Image: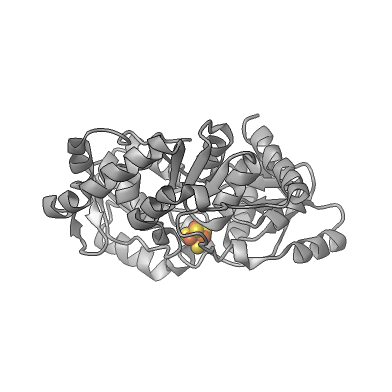
Amino acid sequence: MQQNNPFANQETECLFKELSKVTNIKTGTRFTNEEINKIIPQIQKINKLKKEKDALILAHYYCSPKILFGVADFCGDSYALAKKAREAKQQNIIFCGVTFMAETAKILNPTKKVILPPITAGCSLANGITADEVLALRKKYPNAKVLCYINSSAEVKAVSDTCVTSSNVFKIAERTKQDQIIFVPDLYMAKNIEAYLKNKGIKKEIIAAGATCCVHDKFTLTQLKEIKTKYPEAKIISHPECLPEICKNSDFVGSTAGMLKFVKENQSKIFAVFSEWGLINMLEAQNPKKTFLPCGRICASMKRNNLDNIENVLENLESLAGITVDKQLAERAEQTINNMFKEAEK
Ligand code: SF4
């Protein structure tokens, strides 16, 4: 499911070629040559600095296209990024994403310095449940297996059994032997797992707790129906963090990497993507002959990563402490993440 960034570290023309195909969410139009020209010196400076400072730049698909196409060594979904962070050889990992992602990178590769360019960037899901709440659920349902979405804190991972990402959640839930699953912290994803298992005739009780993604929970069924009426030929694709009724009425539901694959392989010419704008930008670049309706939403936390703070952290790398996770806590959380790798790759 991982997607290498085909544009990183290439010539300036490549940046022009890719950025000119994507929507600038500030203007609502394609990036102009003037806008691209303006950022070229900074992009060149960052790419030079990262080599000098032995740094790897990882970026989630929800980041700005300037990061995705200009400076990232690797772009991916949470699963691919976690694997990439685990394998990183560079001494420094600049993680363009949100706090729980950088924390996961540190857990998986503890000897590296991991820096989040905005230093902190929250996520409504990761902030949606505490380890104590998970422990209380464990006590109430002692026979249940605890699956935690990767969008959770290190503390929550440490008290869970197996981590999941949107690229493997359905597969891992389906293979879970226990009849009860405690799923945290995405309430809508829990409902979507329930629907998926029911469709497959698998009986399991899903005990959900936590919150919803403040970006994906804003898509509505009314919006979806309007799109279907206006563009009956459009394929609707959505993320499992969306409302169950959105997922139920979508042509495809999957992780960001899954959506990229679906669009690439699908013959349709028009798509409505119920996810974050950064992903739509990547889709626009990879599929210039296909149309993407402007229905994306913005994750303000992801957009806190920008060229200025990437340049700044690279310049001051030596004086920055980076992400820290208590050693014992990290070891317990790592076990939960490794359980995911084992189950996802079976
Ligand atoms: S899009 Fe939602 S789940 Fe992803 S980082 Fe933003 S708030 Fe968290």
Looking at the image, is 286 positioned above or below residue 213?
Answer: above
**Residue 82 in sight here:** yes
- Quarter of the image for the C terminus: give it: top right
Of 341 and 108, the residue lying toward us:
108
Left or right, 87 with reference to 291: right
* Residue located 27% across and 33% down the image: 10
Left or right, 213 with reference to 178: left
The x, y position of residue 249, in whole percent, is 44, 57
* Residue located 74% across and 47% down the image: 327
Left or right, 270 with reference to 209: left
The x, y position of residue 296, in whole percent, is 34, 60
* Residue located 17% across and 55% down the image: 35
The x, y position of residue 141, in whole percent, is 84, 59
Report the coloring of the rendering.
one colour
Looking at the image, is 39 positioned above or below residue 344?
Answer: below
Residue farthest to the front?
319
**Residue 288 in sight here:** no
Of 125 and 52, the residue lying toward us:
52
Of 48 and 83, the residue lying toward us:
48
The x, y position of residue 48, in whole percent, is 33, 38
- Number of numbered labels in the structure image: 0
Left or right, 72 with reference to 181: left
